[in-house]
Image: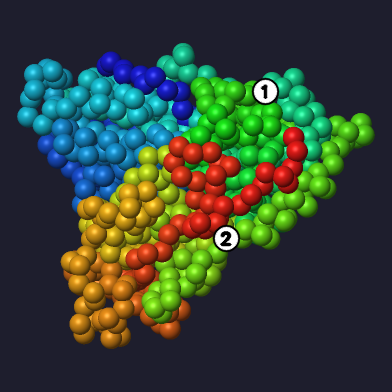
């Protein structure tokens, strides 16, 4: 066996069960060893499609009573489903594909999981070991292709190496900073016999994630927190992955510092909490964006100072010292230099920070943030999130998404596609609990929502799962609704149908003189005569080709359409009441709605627009 390692060192799964007693060795094929290894590491669901090179693995898979295989319609769907499963359950998601085009169709979801630090293991078949490098039929160097976008990858050419490789792949994917691991297995390795015993001896001498933070750095961070006048806790997705939300709340309430949660961290801190300022970034709340700009201390926890949060980097948070805690040392000072770098697991960092801050308080050192809180409350009151209802009486997309959240059953999970609907779902659904919001944050992958929702529902069958999707995103991966219908995975899909590639259209509206080049998804008619509820003249035509209701029905789902605000609650309630099949609701919304607030790409966060032609002025409100 040869191994291909990536240049990044990313990992989840915080707890590992004790190794079981070794079972007696027995003779099996490599394919049987693969399935038994998956059973042994606790994999209970695999999303995939068979093909020639991986076919040997599918024969013993048929006999497994512990691993459920979900036959998807496209390998991209398998990868995103594995991601949704991992995000909803906290376990490692698994997808499987054959060689060549099957493997390359996994590249997008692997890259997506890598950007968002999601633990998945992608298993691919490869041509026979003697044919590797000969341009054999359906051969692709998937290890080479995915090297930059996996945490680690393996090429397995010997049957005997399969159990150890699977054990190592799951360990690497789920520990430290989570991430995707690829296991590419030659066809003859699956066909040949080997001796199987479990557990195997793992051999990862260079892999030692640091989880315990340095005590001196923790003490320095606690000192800065109590000396600061304008601190902000900048919370990223790493806090969710570390299962550290309880510790986060304790630290926040102990210090009284305001909290911002990134797009990947929604639900890590309750939206309703009085210290929560909302989401920072390009479409974050004015209070969250401006609090970071005016802070004198930023405590970054499992966040990476990405460009969507910082805006123009050299103008970001000019008055702030930075405490940056992350389990991945490569992230610290990568974009913004940290005054106090802390390498460690977010849960352990927070636990130690709580103790250190308490010690500071007992010594009589406690920060006074009263003026800061008054200023933040003023910004929140002056520039709240909101939207205008369309003057023509058509549906507002923000209102649709807001009502879906308000009418949803308790513990509903939400997966969003990418674009305007993603931002509105982040803004107008209230996230009170961790692990209830999934989206493609780093890669921005259109087509993510439907298969990710499918994976989340497969992992959490008792939860209601809504996919909030756009008419553009939906048309990329909607074939997985067939998978849902045939496998009893009854997700609910809200298509926010504005007849356009909405976010691109918004940029064309703002920055390209309203020249809507190739973003229109409808036929240009001003409405469809005889359409449902008689809306034929209102400018909210949406996409009608395809007819999403008929398409949903053709794929074994219930199809509904809503075009009038008067019908909104009734249609959502009808969708919520159907739990034996997938439901697709085509919400025909006004095409001119925009996402606000907004920081234009490449500009300073100081230039945030609260709404069109509304720029807040904070120049005289604080000195440094």
**Disc 2, SS:** loop
Residue at 39% across, 52% down: 510
Q: Is residue 101 visible?
A: yes
Question: Could you tell me residue 424's position as x and y percent?
Answer: 47, 59
The mark found on residue 385 in the picture is 2
Mark positioned earlier in the residue sequence (1 or 2): 1
Q: Quadrant of residue 546?
A: bottom left
Dot in front, 1 or 2: 2
Residue at 72% across, 56% down: 378
**Vertical placement of 595 versus 590: above or below?**
above
Marks 1 and 2: CB-CB under 8 Å?
no
User: Would you say 592 lies left or right of 410 here?
Assistant: left
Q: Quadrant of residue 522?
A: bottom left
Q: Residues within 10 Å of mark 2 (few under 14, many from 20)?
A: some
Q: CA distance from mark 1 to mark 2?
A: 33 Å
Residue at the far right in the pictured view: 364
Question: Could you tell me residue 44's position as x and y percent?
Answer: 38, 46
**Vertical placement of 157 versus 525: above or below?**
above
Residue at 37% across, 64% down: 592
The quadrant of the rendering that contains the N terminus is top left
The quadrant of the rendering that contains the C terminus is top right
Question: Could you tell me residue 17's position as x and y percent?
Answer: 53, 35
Question: Could you tell me residue 285's position as x and y percent?
Answer: 58, 52
User: Would you say 613 lies left or right of 114 here?
Assistant: right
Q: Which residue is mark 1?
A: 339
């Amino acid at each position: 066996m040869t191994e291909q390692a990536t240049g990044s060192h990313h990992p989840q799964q915080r707890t590992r069960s004790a190794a079981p007693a070794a079972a007696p060795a027995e003779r099996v094929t490599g394919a049987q060893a693969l399935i038994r290894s998956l059973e042994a590491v606790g994999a209970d669901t695999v999303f995939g499609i068979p093909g020639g090179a991986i076919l040997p693995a599918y024969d013993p898979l048929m006999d497994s009573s512990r691993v459920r295989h979900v036959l998807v319609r496209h390998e991209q769907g398998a990868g995103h489903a594995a991601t949704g499963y991992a995000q909803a359950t906290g376990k490692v998601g698994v997808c499987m594909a054959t060689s060549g085009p099957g493997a390359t169709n996994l590249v997008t979801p692997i890259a997506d999981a890598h950007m968002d630090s999601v633990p998945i293991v992608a298993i691919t078949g490869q041509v026979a070991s003697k044919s590797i490098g000969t341009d054999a039929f359906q051969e692709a160097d998937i290890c080479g292709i995915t090297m930059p976008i996996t945490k680690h990858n393996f090429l397995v050419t010997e049957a005997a190496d399969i159990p150890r490789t699977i054990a190592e792949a799951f360990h690497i994917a789920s520990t430290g900073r989570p991430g995707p691991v690829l296991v590419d297995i030659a066809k003859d390795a699956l066909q040949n016999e080997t001796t199987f015993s479990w557990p195997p001896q793992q051999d990862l001498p260079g892999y030692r994630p640091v989880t315990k933070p340095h005590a001196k750095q923790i003490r320095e961070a606690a000192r800065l927190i109590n000396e600061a006048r304008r601190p902000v806790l900048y919370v990223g997705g790493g806090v969710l992955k570390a299962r550290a939300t309880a510790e986060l709340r304790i630290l926040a309430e102990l210090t009284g510092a305001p909290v911002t949660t990134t797009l990947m961290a929604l639900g890590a801190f309750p939206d309703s909490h009085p210290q929560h300022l909302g989401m920072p970034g390009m479409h974050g709340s004015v209070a969250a964006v401006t609090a970071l700009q005016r802070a004198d201390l930023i405590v970054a926890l499992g966040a990476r100072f990405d460009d969507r949060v910082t805006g123009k980097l050299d103008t970001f948070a000019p008055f702030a010292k930075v405490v940056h805690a992350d389990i991945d040392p490569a992230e610290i000072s990568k974009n913004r230099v940290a005054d106090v770098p802390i390498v460690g697991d977010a849960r352990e960092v927070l636990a130690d920070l709580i103790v250190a801050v308490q010690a500071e308080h007992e010594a009589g050192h406690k920060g006074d943030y009263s003026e800061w809180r008054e200023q933040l409350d003023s910004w929140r009151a002056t520039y709240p999130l909101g939207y205008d209802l369309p003057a023509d009486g058509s549906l507002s997309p923000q209102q649709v998404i807001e009502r879906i959240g308000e009418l949803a059953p308790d513990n509903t999970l939400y997966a969003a596609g990418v674009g305007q609907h993603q931002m509105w779902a982040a803004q107008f659904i209230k996230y009170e609990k961790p692990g209830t919001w999934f989206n493609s944050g780093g890669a921005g992958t259109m087509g993510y929502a439907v298969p990710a929702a499918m994976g989340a529902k497969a992992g959490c069958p008792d939860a209601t799962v809504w996919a909030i999707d756009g008419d553009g995103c939906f048309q990329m991966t909607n074939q997985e609704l067939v998978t849902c219908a045939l496998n009893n995975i009854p997700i609910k899909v809200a298509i926010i149908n504005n007849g356009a590639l909405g976010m691109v259209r918004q940029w064309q509206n703002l920055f390209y003189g309203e020249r809507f080049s190739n973003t229109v998804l409808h036929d240009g008619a001003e409405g469809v005569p005889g359409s449902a509820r008689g809306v034929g003249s209102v400018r909210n035509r949406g996409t009608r080709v395809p007819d999403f209701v008929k398409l949903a029905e053709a794929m074994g789902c219930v199809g509904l359409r809503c075009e009038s605000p008067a019908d909104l609650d009734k249609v959502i309630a009808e969708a919520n009441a159907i739990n034996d099949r997938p439901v697709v609701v085509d919400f025909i919304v006004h095409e001119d709605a925009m996402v606000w607030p907004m920081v234009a790409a490449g500009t300073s966060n100081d230039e945030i627009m609260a709404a069109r032609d509304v720029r807040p002025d904070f120049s005289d409100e604080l000195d440094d």
